Amino acid sequence: MSGSPNMKKNAQTRPLFGLCGVLAALVLLGLLSKAMLVVAMVIAFVVFAHELGHFIAARVTGMKATEFFLGFGPRLFSFRRGETEFGVKPILAGAYVKLVGMTNLDDVDPEDESRAYRQQSYPKRLLVASAGSLMHFLMAALGLIVLFSFMGEPVVRGDKWEVASVLERDSDGGLTAAARSGIEPGDRIASIDGEPTIAWADLVEMVRDRPGELVQIEVIRNGSSFSVDATLGSDAEGRGLLGIGGQNSTELIKYGPVSAVRKTATEFTSMVGQSLRGIWSIVANLGEVADRIFSPPNDPNANDNLETRPVSLVGAVQIGASEQLSGSERMQLFVAFNIFIGVFNLLPFLPLDGGHIAIATYERIREGTSGRRHIIDTTRLLPVAYAVVAFLAFFGLGAIYLDIANPLGF
């Protein structure tokens, strides 16, 4: 019996409303911060690329993929190409590819059994299960090559300093000399009245005893030098005030093609190690991590140890959109994000990709040289899988709360 016209109409309009809701949320995010919208779209692309890796590997190895969706929840819209349905769902917290016969619990049409994941050889299953992480590692390697070859690696120089921040108001409420002069973060103050300010202490000494005096400041910005005249202000104790904060200077170092590849290999290996140590640090300090998750809003101690401070996608967007980061630093963040997600997904627990790799490896060991296909009974692993899902949900939702209640100061 077919449904009523009103039911059909509702079924057709519901996805449209959902799609409009997603688009409205993206527009609202763009109005709030264009940088945050860009970072959110980059993260969505990274998630999409992960599943694209699984999909391509499945197609290459002859497995059947029935669905490829970005997001979770009810369908917003979809289309079919061949045997696969592609589409978008409203909860853009991930993506998925549905392969036929991933476990012994899946019902598969007899005609599709030969193309089921569970019937494939060990190398094919290994490739498909690891393809998502391989995509992350590929994007990370390409990002490092771009960083070292074209953008430049940010290297902190201990023998040089630059402007870290500009104070807007002095003790009297007026604009500081730096704010009036147009000095910006990243500038270098080369001299004051012709006297070089090689060290930060040199500038402090020159300014401290000259409140209210007119001085000439030589500024270096992006390799170009120019001079500005400014009348120094004073702080609450009557000492001269320019109105800047200093930090060690950062220089961008670029490498040739061969050196860039070598540097990429070294840095990639180092960042994999850092990801593993970071995961272990969280596991070894679960109590401290839980305390952070239950910390009240604006808790000054919530972010005092970043090694045990979980970060959600909300926090990743906040960090990536920070105006304090340069383009090179954002590329470093993109690389670190991909490597961490790639490594994390290889942990040997269902429903992570590493869980499927562990199962495939165990099955291959059980088969030995018998030539008979061994398929594990996945029902025995369901309690562990449910525990892992509960663990990830707790820390995932907790990290979102933490990023909203106690955002990182980037």
Image: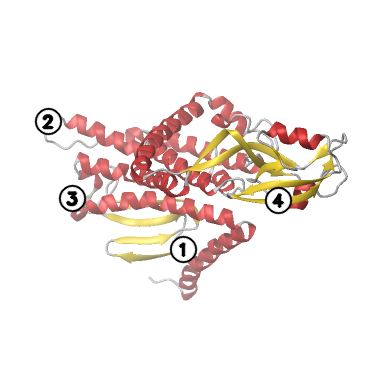
**Residue type at tag 3:** Ser
Asked which secondary structure carries label 4, the reply is: strand
Where residue 5 appears, as percent x and y from the top left, is 47, 75
Residue drawn at (27%, 64%) of the image: 82
In terms of secondary structure, where does tag 3 sit? helix
Q: Residue at x 53, y 61 (%)?
A: 22
Q: Earlier in the sequence, mark 1 or mark 2?
A: 1
Indicate which disc, 3 or 4, sits on the residue closer to the N terminus.
3
Q: Alpha carbon of mark 2 to alpha carbon of mark 3: how far?
A: 22 Å
Q: Are marks 3 and 4 in contact (CB under 8 Å)?
A: no
Q: Measured from the top left, where is residue 121 in percent x and y? A: 19, 42
Amino acid on which disc 4 is placed: Ser
Q: Residues within 10 Å of mark 4 (few under 14, many from 20)?
A: some
The numbered mark, 3 or 1, whose residue comes first in the sequence reads 1
Q: Amino acid at mark 2?
A: Thr
Mark earlier in primary sequence (2, 3): 3
